[in-house]
Image: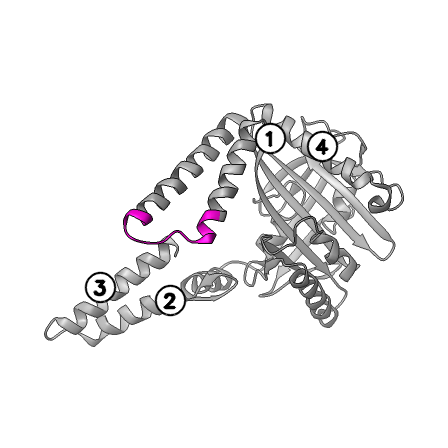
């Protein structure tokens, strides 16, 4: 149970109970208490009814149009929309099929070492990896801060940023709808990965998405935490989880298998951070492209089916499509 759910339930039960017990209480008090309790119920995408009401209210009140501008000045790429991000974009040199040559493991190890080096540098940085598939092939881009050098195998290609954000060299716009955004190139729908815990170990989850549709783009954003701060956060998480578990046991509640698995993951994370690995906060988006709304619906269904088969849970982002579309761009403007 999350904090706002507990607050709504406590407040709702208090109001309704006061309205029932107290003499000559107003019926409005009882109805308001019941409404607060109902608003704490989860409905879809892991959100409660109160959260959906807040999302719908913000959607109705904000403007529908957003401008997108991409400028290249020779040293970096500036992407300006609901926020501003300045990055350097690097293209991966694809050589045949990576999964058959074994080079995918080399690329992954190089990226992991690169992220560890960024964390050891002592500054928080934002990195993003973008894989754009199309009928003619795929392009993989790495967006880094202006002062970061890419790992081996990546070459500088700032022009790739315009193709990733659907603005190849010209200013563009977004028009937000409830379940998609419309750009100059056509409608786009953005899904956000919520949970990878259902994926079978040593199996590719996002690879199935690329096989399911040739009109999608993957964006993996990583907020790299500096090593000293990462150590403090990892230790604090383990200590807090251990204290909560001890309090539950002392209160007479049994430790569940889910609690034990969660503690094991936190302990493993703490040991890896102490060994020099980077602590990162990850967000993964899947952007589905189409030329018409009817085609977009079919593509989204295929992508969602592939995610479910892989054991991945996703969110549709209804009422937040423009926000997510901007957040999945290189550098995450408005992140």
Q: Nearer the viewer, residue 258 or 230?
A: 258
Q: Residue at x 37, y 45 (%)?
A: 245
- Mark 2 or mark 1, earlier in chain: 2
Which element is circle 2 on? helix
- Mark 1 or mark 4, earlier in chain: 4
Which is in the foreground here, disc 2 or disc 1?
1
Left or right: 267, with 288 as reference point: left
Which residue matches tag 2? 39
Residue 246 in view, yes or no: yes
Could you say where residue 193 lies in the image, as x and y percent from the top left?
61, 54
Disc 1 versus disc 3: distance between alpha carbons?
48 Å
Is residue 249 within the magenta segment?
yes
Q: Residue at x 73, y 30 (%)?
A: 150
Which element is circle 3 on? helix
Disc 4 versus disc 2: distance between alpha carbons?
46 Å
Q: Which mark is residue 14?
A: 3
């Amino acid at each position: 149970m999350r904090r706002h759910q507990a607050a709504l339930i406590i407040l709702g039960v208090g109001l309704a109970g006061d309205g029932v017990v107290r003499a000559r209480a107003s019926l409005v008090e009882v109805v308001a208490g019941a409404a607060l309790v109902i608003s704490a119920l989860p409905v879809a995408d892991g959100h409660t009814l109160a959260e959906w009401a807040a999302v719908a209210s913000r959607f109705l009140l904000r403007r529908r149009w957003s401008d997108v501008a991409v400028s290249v000045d020779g040293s970096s790429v500036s992407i300006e929309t609901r926020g501003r991000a300045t990055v350097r974009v690097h293209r991966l040199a694809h050589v045949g099929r990576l999964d058959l040559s074994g080079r995918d493991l080399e690329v992954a190890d190089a990226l992991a070492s690169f992220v560890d080096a960024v964390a050891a540098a002592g500054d928080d940085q934002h990195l993003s990896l973008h894989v754009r598939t199309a009928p003619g092939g795929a392009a993989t881009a790495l967006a880094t801060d202006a002062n970061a050098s890419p790992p081996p195998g990546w070459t500088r290609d700032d022009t790739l940023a315009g193709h990733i954000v659907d603005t190849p060299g010209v200013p563009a716009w977004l028009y937000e709808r409830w379940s998609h955004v419309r750009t100059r190139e056509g409608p786009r729908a953005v899904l956000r990965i919520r949970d990878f815990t259902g994926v079978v170990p040593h199996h590719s989850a996002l690879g199935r998405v690329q096989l399911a549709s040739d009109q999608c783009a993957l964006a993996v954003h990583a907020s790299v935490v500096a090593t000293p701060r990462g150590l403090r956060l990892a230790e604090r998480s383990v200590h807090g989880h251990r204290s909560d578990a001890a309090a539950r046991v002392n209160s007479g509640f049994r430790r569940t298998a889910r609690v034990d698995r969660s503690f094991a993951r936190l302990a493993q994370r703490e040991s890896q951070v102490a060994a020099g690995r980077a602590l990162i906060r990850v967000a993964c988006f899947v952007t589905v492209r189409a030329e018409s709304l009817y085609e977009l619906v079919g593509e989204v269904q295929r992508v969602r089916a592939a995610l479910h088969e892989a054991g991945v849970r996703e969110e549709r982002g209804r009422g937040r499509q423009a926000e997510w579309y901007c957040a999945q761009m290189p550098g995450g403007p408005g992140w």
